[in-house]
């Protein structure tokens, strides 16, 4: 009997790739590049929020989430080096834009800062879920990291919602704008 028929094959990352899709190597580079950029952007958003709200009770909540994002960034910093992936060329943009978004929403008030977190984390949840689904058993460690970070991001979203994110005046519009910007940042960081 043929061994390929008798034993199930482990799902590999290339499973499901269609003509025109990036190669497995490019896919993995994109995943590491964009996740590194995203965690860097999250750190910058929280830094901007803390510049405004750092001495408030909400600042303590933000600080806890920021600490977790720094841990995520440290992980992707290591992966960038270990996997020899070029970081996005847009890091200077995300440096300024992340801080500006964080500070601007914090200046709008504590609820708006939480609305920013909720919106960003909802997009990251979708993003990480797609990445985890694309990774096979050959990338089990990367998939496990992404799934753990996804759980952390969902916890941040829930924390933001518990702190009245949805009570922000104009919440739907603010959330939609931040989500659109986050999706654009993801798309650009994968490619540039």
Image: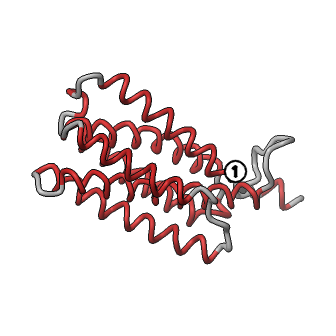
Q: Horizontal and vertical percent for residue 101?
A: 38, 44
Q: Is residue 134 left or right of residue 21?
A: left
Q: Nearer the viewer, residue 179 or 52?
A: 52
Quarter of the figure with residue 162: top left
Q: Nearer the viewer, residue 95 or 184?
A: 95
**Circle 1 residue:** 191
Q: Horizontal and vertical percent for residue 131?
A: 59, 49
Q: Nearer the viewer, residue 130 or 70?
A: 70
Q: Horizontal and vertical percent for residue 86?
A: 67, 67
Could you tell me which secondary element the residue under label 1 belongs to?
helix
Q: Is 57 placed above or below 36 here?
A: above
Q: Is 90 placed above or below 174 here?
A: below
Q: Is 86 placed above or below 18 here?
A: below
Give the number of callouts.
Answer: 1
Residue in the picture at 57% in, 50% down: 132
Q: Nearer the viewer, residue 111 or 96?
A: 96
User: What's the image's color scheme?
Assistant: secondary structure
Quarter of the figure with residue 125: top left
Which part of the image, by quadrant, shows the N terminus? bottom right
Residue in the picture at 45% in, 54% down: 96
Residue in the picture at 68% in, 74% down: 84
Quarter of the figure with residue 135: bottom right
Q: Label 1: few (<14), some or many (≥20) within 10 Å?
A: some
Q: Is residue 16 left or right of residue 94?
A: right
Residue in the picture at 42% in, 35% down: 178
Q: Is residue 20 left or right of residue 155?
A: right
Residue lying furthest right: 1
Q: Horizontal and vertical percent for residue 52?
A: 21, 51
């Amino acid at each position: 009997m043929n061994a390929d028929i008798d034993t199930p094959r482990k799902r590999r990352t290339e499973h499901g790739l269609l003509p025109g899709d990036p190669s497995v190597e490019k896919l993995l580079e994109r995943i590491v590049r964009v996740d590194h950029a995203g965690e860097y952007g999250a750190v910058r958003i929280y830094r901007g929020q803390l510049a405004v709200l750092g001495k408030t009770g909400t600042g303590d909540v933000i600080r806890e989430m920021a600490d977790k994002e720094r841990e995520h960034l440290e992980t992707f910093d290591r992966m960038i080096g270990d996997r020899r992936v070029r970081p996005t060329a847009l890091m200077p943009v995300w440096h300024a834009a992340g801080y500006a978004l964080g500070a601007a929403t914090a200046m709008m008030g504590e609820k708006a800062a939480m609305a920013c977190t909720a919106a960003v984390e909802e997009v990251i949840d979708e993003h990480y879920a797609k990445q985890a689904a694309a990774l096979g058993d050959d990338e089990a460690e990367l998939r496990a990291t992404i799934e753990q970070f996804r759980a952390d991001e969902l916890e941040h979203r829930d924390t933001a919602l518990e702190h009245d994110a949805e009570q922000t005046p104009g919440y739907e519009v603010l959330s939609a704008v931040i989500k659109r910007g986050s999706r654009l940042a993801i798309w650009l960081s994968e490619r540039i």
